[in-house]
Amino acid sequence: MAFQMFPMRSDPKKFKMLANGRMTEIEFRQKTESELYDTIAIPAATTLTNNRYEFFRDIQGKTDIDTNISSSRKLLSGTKMQIFFVGIYFPVSAGNILALSDDTKKIMDSGLLTVKVNDTEIAKGQLYRFPIGYGLQGCTTRNDTELYHLGVPSTAAIRPMIVDQWIESTNDISAWIEFPTRTWDAAYVAPLTTVHHHVRLVLKGLMWK
């Protein structure tokens, strides 16, 4: 089948295609591999049980090192995203405060992540279910500070979504970590952090306008 394409002066991304005597308008859009991410802070000496920490909501004062959204719970106007996976990253420091591996273990094994688009859950589960493939690996002689990460720091550790999720700037994106109590376990002691920690949620995929 022979066809011809003609660029449209009004929009460089749009073309008219003539094929079999029929004229069709088509559009090409640049898609960029990207991430949507935000960071929460868990203070020192915090009893985690029954606390809830929200991502993508409290962004005032944050810069690109901690979040890349400029409007609470929204993509940039006109932006769309195809999400491939959801990951949790535990930074090894919060500024000058080095994370303690004991705290990281408590957060990871006690935390429950929920991610929603509008009112639809697209991901939910214990934090260990969301390895990200980022982080450090190695040894240290410092007490209680071994390099601890969720999953091997390799793309092989990434757990892709079974079905890609699609979002756009009109959607409401919400996500949080909560720490439910375990009343069924009589010997259970609520986890308590020692130092200040950061936790980062990363939604990875393709983004375009």
Image (cartoon, rainbow, N blue to C red):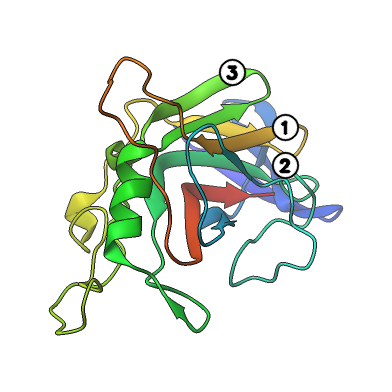
Give whichever of discs 2 and 1 has the lower sequence position: 2
**Is 10 on the left or on the right of 146, as rendered?**
right
Q: In the structure shown, which secondary structural element does the residue marked by tag 1 occupy?
A: loop
Q: Give the quadrant of residue 169.
A: top right
Q: Count neighbours of disc 2 (C-alpha within 10 A) and say few if under 14, some if 14 to 19, many if 20 or more.
A: many
Q: Residue at x 64, y 70 (%)?
A: 64
- The numbered dot on residue 73 is 2
Q: Residue at x 28, y 63 (%)?
A: 101
The span from disc 3 to disc 2 (Cα, nearest Å) is 14 Å
Q: CA distance from mark 2 to mark 1?
A: 6 Å
Residue at 68%, 36% in the rendered image: 168
Q: Quadrant of residue 57?
A: top right
Residue 49 position, x and y percent, is: 48, 35
- x and y percent of residue 44 in the render? 52, 62
Q: Is residue 171 left or right of residue 41?
A: right
C-beta proximity under 8 Å, tags 2 and 1: yes
Q: In what element is the residue under mark 2? A: loop
Residue under label 3: 120
Type of amino acid under label 2:
Arg
| Left or right of 112 on screen, residue 176 | right
Where disc 3 sits, the SS reads strand
List x then y, in percent, for residue 193.
43, 56
Q: Quadrant of the N terminus?
A: top left
The amino acid at mark 3 is Thr
Q: CA distance from mark 3 to mark 1?
A: 10 Å
Looking at numbered disc 1 in the image, what kind of residue is underneath it?
A: Asp
Q: Which residue is mark 1?
A: 172
Instruction: Determine contact: label 3, label 1, CB under 8 Å.
Output: no
